[in-house]
Amino acid sequence: MSKNYILAIDQGTTSSKVLVMDTDLNPVCEHATPFEQYFPNPGWVEHDLNQIWGSVQAGIEVVTAKVDAKNIIAIGITNQRETICFWNKLTGEPLARAIVWQDRRTSDRCEELRAQKIESMIQGKTGLLLDPYFSSTKLEWMLKNNSAVKEASKRGVLAVGTIESFLLARLSAGIAHATEPSNASRTMLLNLSNQKWDAELLTLFNVSENILPEIKPSFGNFGSTKNVKGLPDGIPVTGMIGDQQSALLGQACIEEGQAKCTFGTGAFLLMNIGKKIQISKNRLLTTIAWTDQNAETTYALEGSAFMAGATIQWLRDGLQIISKASDVEALASSVNSTEGVMFVPAFTGLGAPYWDPNARAVISGLTRGSTKAHIARAALEGIAFQNVDLLLAMEQDMGGRLKALNVDGGACKNNLLMQIQADLVGCNLERPVFTETTSLGAVFAAGLGVGVWTSLNEIKKVWKLERQFESTMDTNTRTKRHLEWKRAVSAACPRAPA
């Protein structure tokens, strides 16, 4: 008897992965394809959408050569979120490079809006804080400065959306132009209360609603494949969800108070806060985790550290003290401490709770005795300390201590980093057997949308623990180390509290 499969597209910041699982959640095959990053000006980060689609198409062709594509019953998409795309709705062709979530070109615009004292209004509507991280000011900038985008808008052929919307359009031969709440809530244009594009915010950012995608529940039918090489026509796309929310789902954090941290290009900590909107008092984000097939919405608190795995990439490519990313664990383990070296990896500014796009990376405490091993260990601590700040803010909002934190993503395989994180955050870390939970979340979303699973409770039974990292650092040492970190941050970030 032939098995049914779910195909998941995990479109990330540096590569696109295509995964096939059977409906018993056995991984069958996968393929990841990297693509180029563009940095045309300081602080600018762009992606070529044809290269992104090419990387997805390459993955589809590889995996469908290994399975019978006729047995693929559903497709799920998870994606880098705030990255904004522009294409011709008639031809499907990109009109410009996508502006990536890491891009800081609209920092001045955010400062201008902040000076108008409207951040509290924006936060109340969207759960977000003014920062170039989000899509709205990127979209506004492109509509003002790119001639091809402006012309397409005048002619009524402009389509705009985050990555999942663009991929859906390509998969459906341009028929479908849709998004879902977890991605839409990252644009700074969605009203959390009614889950509609907000008229006041559209006016503020000079955006016409007719260029934006239709908003549908995260689990359900978005459209079907047409003219995709390697896939038969008619396979439904039944799940779409932003990458960090997808990891929350893939970690089976379906109950209020459960939290996860994904160690990818950045580090992203999300806590399930249930069915009610809670606006953070500690400069965290309130976001939609997902809206299910019954139109019930789950919300989350989120804090983001923009540089996690990307910090290790800088040690490899910029400082060139390691030849491959996995070498950092052995190098950092060769010393017992940083000997006072502190590393604040604010290469693209600092996110929550500081929200300073002008912060810059700092390595401090260097002496003649400092070596590349001390810097490597300080880099791992810098990744972990950012998450400490996020979790402390999250605990203050929730009014209690977190007992355990689920971890996933590529860098969670670094055992030293996980132990450092457990020690500095003061709670146990739980690493699952299947660490690529972002992809797994896309499988769950598609399966829920097509009826493989009928409720979120059914997926909770699937999650399995691989290893627990216990916190071993005493409270006094942890407090002292955090004060050292805060002093280092003050040198990198003028907005940091004393």
Image (spheres, grey):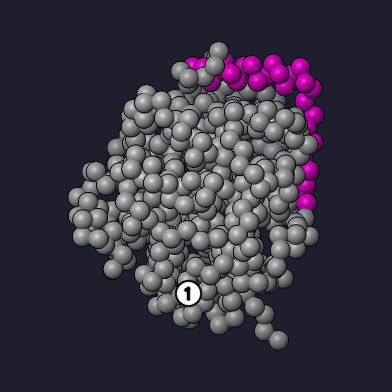
Picture residue at 46% right of the left edge, 75% below the top = 225
Q: Is residue 136 left or right of residue 11?
A: left
Q: Residues within 10 Å of mark 1 (few under 14, many from 20)?
A: many
At a point 63% along the width and 56% down the height, the residue shown is: 296
Q: Quadrant of the C terminus?
A: top right
Residue at x-position 52% and y-position 74%: 236
203 is higher (above) or lower (below) than 456: above
Left or right: 68 as drawn, with respect to 88: right
Q: Residue 129: horizontal and vertical position, in percent?
A: 48, 34
**Residue 94 makes an appearance in the image:** no
Q: Secondary structure at mark 1?
A: strand
> What amino acid is found at the position of numbered circle 1 in the picture?
Ser
Q: x%, y% of residue 260?
A: 67, 44
Q: Write down the residue under mark 1.
A: 224
Return the x and y of residue 200 as percentages of the image width and height: 38, 42
Q: Is residue 149 visible?
A: yes
Q: Most prominent secondary structure in the magenta stretch?
A: helix
Nearest to the observer: residue 402 or residue 204: 204
Magenta stretch: residue 205 in it? no
Q: Position of residue 146 (x, y in %)?
A: 23, 47
Corner quadrant of residue 305: top right
> Relative to 381, is 246 above or below?
below
Q: Quadrant of the N terminus?
A: bottom right
Using residue 438 as the reference point, say whether residue 138 is left or right of it. left
Residue closest to the eye, 81 or 300: 300
Q: Quadrant of residue 486?
A: top right
Which residue lies at the image location 71% right of the left edge and 63% below the top edge? 455
> Which quarter of the figure has residue 308?
top right
> Which portion, as a residue range, is magenta?
465-491
Q: Nearer the viewer, residue 314 or 67?
A: 67
